[in-house]
Image: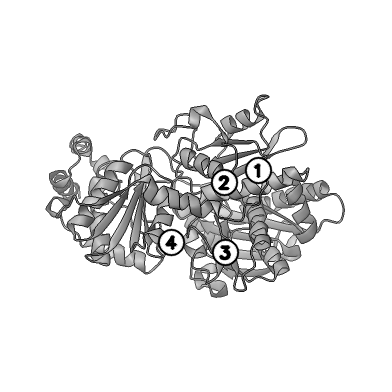
Amino acid sequence: MSMDLELLAADWLAQDPDPVTRAELAGLLDDPEALRDRFGAKLEFGTAGLRGELGAGPNRMNRVTVMRAAAGLAAVLGPGKLVVVGFDARHNSDVFARDTAAVLTGAGLRVAVMGGRYPTPVLAFAVRHLRADAGVMVTASHNPPRDNGYKVYWGDGAQIVPPLDTEISQAIDAVGRVDELPLGDDWQTLGQAAILQPYLEAVTSLALGDARELRVAYTPLHGVGGSTLAAAFIAAGFKSPMIVGAQHRPDPDFPTVAFPNPEEPGAMDLALELASAPAVQADIVIANDPDADRCAVGARQPDGRFRMLTGDEVGGLLGEHVLRTTSGQDRLVATTIVSSSLLGRIADAYGVPYRETLTGFKWIMKAGPGLIYGYEEALGYSVGSDAGLPVHDKDGISAALTIGAIAAQAKRDGRTLLDLLDDQARKYGLHATSQLSFRVEDLSLITKAMQRLRDTPPSELGGRKVESAEDLASGAGGLPPTDGLRYRLAGGARIVVRPSGTEPKLKCYLEVVLPVTGDVATTRTQATQDLIALKQDIAEALGL
């Protein structure tokens, strides 16, 4: 085995065009464990494309891995097709974008490369705007600084789904040495007028009302969303948000946060500090993740402190806004099986069809024709109008702009986003959600925990009877098969248990639905207690 690894490493060294990873690998040739880590496995290409740690070898993100991916994509698309390539500010993103363009043009395809570091939703928009056949975005979204990734979009502007991912993966496996690939250099570079301006025109044409008096504190978390979001707010007639200075400029090392995800503890600290500053006194606080496809929102409470809204709470506010401001006959809204059921209640009240999909925006975009709004609880939203969806993927810029419009109208009415949430609770019932995650070093623990639930299904959780148990691996409810379990409990509660698709985690998604008969705050307290009871019981049932 050691000799095989050495041969693989030698072959890699001979074709790697990057002096940095060549030097790294040369220093590891006498370290069998390090070679096994890099060459004993490979990054698998799937519906999320590629994502992993930077470094040498097939189990890392590097120029060889990216060139092979581009060659596989070229083989599936064929000569003459148009591909748009975008990149963010992570380490090597621009290099990987140029390598992709070189391989694609060398294979006879036409390529348009974004002429700067733009958010992922701008790339997704560009695919449809330019009528391209595919798109590539070099980003690792909100992953740690050591990672990068490679997302592939198809001609509909949405992320790829099976079986296309398998077809591309097989084509990648058939690629030979990258130093033998023909490379081109005649790609087009897209300036702001070609793509950013059309994107801004599309998102500012959403139903935003006319209220504009709003104070917004904002952070791009060292990512690429800052200038695009500010331009969108100004183009829509808002004042430019007040931006956290220490996190304004793109920085691939994300020096002020432990983890560049607005959902993580501490990530919002500087933004909340800015929002609460006496000279600022913001009405709301907004954050994008580093590639700006997600949006986090916080609202000022009566005591002056801020409360971060859950993804489901923002999803409900945006969903009702879209349904209230559209009038098409064939409208459809969608969310995932792990998101709140509130959107379904809202859609029913407006007489609009509602669908649930598997986790991930790639599935939301396949919910059906007439889709005008989709969201997932992990801070992802695609906001549309009667003209349709500007972006066929989650878009943290248009979501921020729309929640700003909602907040501005509420402020004009002497109210806040929190008041609007209370309105929804009274009208549709309080839909309270929470998550329970288990991070493991040994992935077999997740397999064993899932098998334990399948072998010994619980009859009661959190004091509520389990009314139905569905194994999503068998394609329950007409959904494509996926590893997961869904429990429906008495009183409208629900738990979904599934392994994470991107991290070594087992995730549990919990929801309780309570009628509001008196004070909303009292009902929220009860819901919190109910969620705690559900967490305790599902953790015990999993044995983790």
Residue closest to the eye, 351 or 457? 351
Decide if residue 500 is in sight here. Answer: yes
Q: Residue at x 62, y 28 (%)?
A: 273
Q: Residue at x 77, y 36 (%)?
A: 302
Mark 4 and mark 3 residues within 8 Å of each other at the beta carbon: no
Type of amino acid at the residue the image marks with label 4: Ala
Q: Position of residue 31 (x, y in %)?
A: 22, 37
Q: Position of residue 286 (x, y in %)?
A: 59, 40
Q: Earlier in the sequence, mark 1 or mark 3?
A: 1
What kind of element bears circle 3? strand
Q: Is residue 116 above or below residue 326?
A: above
Name the image quarter holding residue 324. bottom right
Mark 2–mark 4 distance (CA, rounded to whole Å): 26 Å
Q: Which residue is mark 1?
A: 212
Type of amino acid at the residue the image marks with label 1: Arg
Q: Earlier in the sequence, mark 1 or mark 4?
A: 4
Q: Image check: 439 left or right of 460?
A: left
Q: Is residue 80 above or below residue 438?
A: below
Q: Earlier in the sequence, mark 4 or mark 3?
A: 4
Q: Position of residue 86 (x, y in %)?
A: 35, 49
Mark 4–mark 3 distance (CA, rounded to whole Å): 14 Å
Q: Which residue is mark 4?
A: 158
What kind of element bears circle 1? loop
